[in-house]
Amino acid sequence: KRVFSSHQATILLFLHGNLIPSSFIIIIHSNLSLTMTAATALSQDQLRDILSRSLSPDAAARQHAENALLASQTAPGHCITVLRLVASNEAADGPVRQAAAVHFKNMVKKGWAPNSGGAHGDDHDADAEFRKHAVPAQDRDVIKNHLVELMCTVPPQIQVQLGESISLIAASDFPSQWDNLLPDLISRLDNRDWSVVNGVLVTANSIFKRFRYVQRSDALYKDILYVLHRFQEPLTELFKAINAQLDAFTAGNNVAELRPRLAALRTICRIFYSLNYQDLPEYFEDHMEEWMAGFAKHLEYVNPHLEDSDEENEPGPIDVLQVAVIQNLYLYANKDEEPFLPYLAKFTTLVWNLLLRVSQLPKHDALATTGIRFLSSLVGKLMHRELFQEEATLREIFARIVIPNLMIREVDEERFEDNPQEFILSDMEGSDTESRRKCAQELLRAMCRQFEPQTTQICSEHVSQMLASFHADAANQWRNKDVAIHLMLGISIKTESAQYGVSQVNEGVNVMEFFSSHVLTELQEPNMTVRPMVKATSIKFVSIFRNQFTKQHLEALLPLLIAHLGSPDVVVHTYAAAAMEKILTCKVDSGTQGGTISKVPKIGRAELNPVLNQLFTGLFSIVDNVDLDENEYVMKCIMRASNVARDDLLQVVQVVLEKLTAALARVAKNPKNPQYNHYLFESIAVLIRSVCTIDAAHTTAFENFLFPPFQDVLQKEVAEFTPYVFQLLAQILEFRPEGAGLGAAYTALFPPLLSPTLWECKGNIPALTRLLIAYLSKGASEILVQQPNSLLGILGVFQKLISSQANEQYAFDLLRAIVMYVPQEAFMPRFKDVLQIILTKMQKKKTEKLVGLISHFFALFVGKFGPQAYFEQLNLLQNGLGLNILAHVWIPRLLFAPPTRLEAKTQIVGLTKLLCETPVLLADANAQNIWSQIVCCAVKIVASPDSHLDSLSADGDDDDVEIGYDATYSVLHFAARPARDPFPDVPDASIMLAQSLHRLCASHPGRFTPLIQKGFESDPKLGAGLESLCLRAGVSLS
């Protein structure tokens, strides 16, 4: 039995999916308790039976077993029973023990600590979710005291699960709440069972990974020092001991003994990487010789008995160790650590020799790319120039490293044809995936940074030779042309970004001449089956150098790229679509306006129009082909082309919309490509925006066309799509003509939107809030007439949202919409309850963000309803509360973090009304002091150039920005709601402030000037700002 009590807490009650309407606020007094049924612990036999049934092929049996596990997992002792079963030695328990280990790991993952990414102390949803899975406090010490020991006694496959469990617990408890973890792990490093040693090392590695890729802080360094003082010496001793054993076991060809030791060395290298990531620790500097000697030994180590000649894809134990060693060398080389410099020349030679030995097989890809990256990091630095400055060295790098790693291999051809998605991922411009080709090109660019003339000359020679070879035998030597193009890509680019392409090129290379002579010819070849891999590379060349092409070049290229949409090769038509999408975002300077360089698209609506039909035909021929996978690059091109076409979409809107809704119906059955889905909904949003901007009457057609597929998505509860559907529904509703009302379809949809179950899904909340706001903006009065209790439901949604810190923003978005659109007589009777919720929330956790939201809301409320309503409502709760909030919440926030844009205007309007329409602020010295501070805040906002009072939205013409899926919540860029000015009748809030103060001072000569001067005592510059404002407004305060 758990008892929840509060003197004056507020909650929202749900019953059978409906809000209880009898009272919007339910006050729980201290004598009221809520009970929860305690979870029941299972015996070991019961648990064995349930876990056995969880492995059943029968779905119903599995679901029943999983429900039973969920119901008992928070019971005290359940975790201990699970671990006892994991420890069981009965042979028949093998699969059950494995299932128990997985079950334990999942319990730890969900129930050891609240999710650091989303849970907050007052986030009711997150807390409730955590409590459903929380590991009982009384079990935790027992688990931590025995888990390491248990991990060391179980079979390897179970050991993996327990090791991950230890890492999960350590993420929250280590070291401050688990001080015996490290001693437990260290004590087992001398175990004779190498599965135990490797289990300990893998666990330690997963714990220490958190020291990488994070910002430095005192807390981080404290944890690193804690680990170093205890772990650095045992780690070094183990490293030395294993190295000493390698020779003996190698001489005896004892593969069984070598494999676990090489695995241990590889993990030790990864631990070394974690412990050295932030800084070079003093201990490792003192023992540099021992570590570097070991690394050198590993790079030179060869053992044919550990190499599988039949294996082509999976790297061997020596390969993965050498990769880990080079990663450590790369770390030290990039840090420019002085103690490492004496070893640099030797390691450069060792890595060089290793690169000459590695095969072209995929199993050596990681070793090749890591080694090339290491060389690139050295070649590109002036301090290491002498290692590579000889021309013979540069030529050897070209001949023996760069060109072999640029050459198309048989495995690349197979991937191009049979696994195009994988090929694109490794080869596409802007992809994060490393490949031999990418690394070889990076090596070229590093060489150009230090040796540009020599590198350019050598590269040009190789390009000429390879092109000559191609022209002599094009059918068989096409790979040489592909390499030649990649060589040009490597030496031509000096500065580029994935989003905007190349911004600076090597002046020693004529990119356009090379394009005209060698790339354009490939694109002009009409036969799509001729050299498809070279075609793909040629299209990539165009995409990368899109900024270097003139407007005329790009206009001529569009038909060629559209033709390649008809290629049967997925890579070719994907590259063509991706290239056109990027070209459509290219801009060129068009002059200077107001001191800012203005840019216009190279390919705009006029240039796209002649090929628009052919472009959509080519793109949708790929989308409609059910034999092809969902292609996110093609759908992104549809989105971008639709946006550029704008008004011209009217001629094709019906066909395009039919194609898009057909695609939506297909993917809704099994959503699997989030990026594709996102661009699909963005494309629909573009159509709505473009067509309805021309004529809002088109919203009816969109409703008729889109409501059936949207209804299908909602009925089938396609969770991935519901936030998108709600955003598009809001967008269409916002475009409905003024005075047209909500319409039958939207009216029928409204009641279900208040269903609590809809708001339980966190991903729905931003979109649902947006949709409710759209309803209020278009038909608040209509809703209240047809559904009188709907305001209670909306306020209930507000109360639920504000209970979660993660959703506070949406709560206040909704509340501001209520103030803006709901008639005052309907809203004001409930305002006292709303204030009580807000103040209870602030009293519980007064964050900077919450205070900002509250002060913004109060400014809007005062601006709409006047200061008298503000003081009356707050003083109903407590006498003097209005002044108290002004003095201790509202004003301090404005002084600490002045608002900008739309909120800045709202604040000025609200503050102006407080200053000029509030006699209570002149009642006594304290109130007059608050009045002076309000003047200070208002003038500070107006005088600040950061306020941007003349620009209500930070969003400009940013339709060329990078758009894509976000796992948390994907906002549809093209469905974005424009900022709504709550005070359109106030063209300039700063002028309103000056004129209002002028009238106030004129009506009471000599009374307000001293108060204004008092407000500026803390910042005398504000006086000059107010004078400037008055001069601009043509008024005087004297």
Image: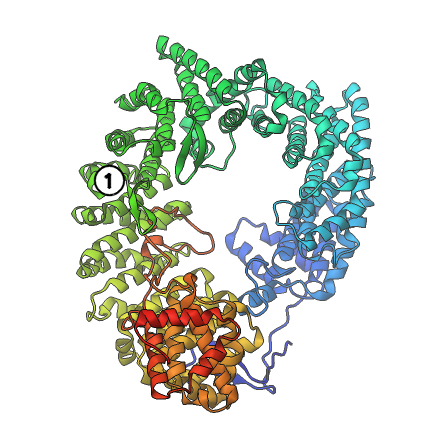
When the figure is inspected, residue 150 is found, relative to residue 882, above or below; the finding is above
**Residue at 81% in and 32% down:** 240
Q: How many marks?
A: 1
Quarter of the image for the N terminus: give it. Answer: bottom right
Position of 44 relative to 403 (above/below): below
Q: Residue furthest front?
A: 1038
Q: Quadrant of residue 119?
A: bottom right
* Nearer the observer, 244 or 459: 459
Quick one: SS at disc 1? helix
Quarter location, residue 104: bottom right
Q: Which of 516/476 is in front? A: 516
**Above or below for 30 versus 229:** below
- Asked whether residue 1007 is in view, the answer is yes
Residue 860 drawn at (x, y percent): 38, 75
Q: Residue furthest left?
A: 651
Residue 833 in the figure: left or right of residue 1003: right
Q: Is residue 519 left or right of residue 486?
A: left
Going 62% across and 52% down the picture, which residue do you hit? 52
Q: Give the side of residue 256 with respect to residue 889, left or right.
A: right
Kindly identify which residue carries mark 1.
Answer: 616
What amino acid is labelled 1 in the image?
A: Phe
Q: Position of residue 1007 (x, y in %)?
A: 42, 87
In the image: residue 893, left or right of residue 794? right
Q: Position of residue 635 (x, y in %)?
A: 33, 43
- Depth order, front residue of 138/342: 342
Q: Quadrant of the C terminus?
A: bottom left
Q: Is residue 911 above or below residue 197?
A: below
Image location of residue 213, percent across then percent down:
61, 45
How crowded pointer 1 is (Cα within 10 Å; few <14, some 14-19, many 20+) is rated as some
Instruction: Residue 780: name its quadrant.
Output: bottom left
Can residue 11 be seen at all in this image of the molecule?
Answer: no
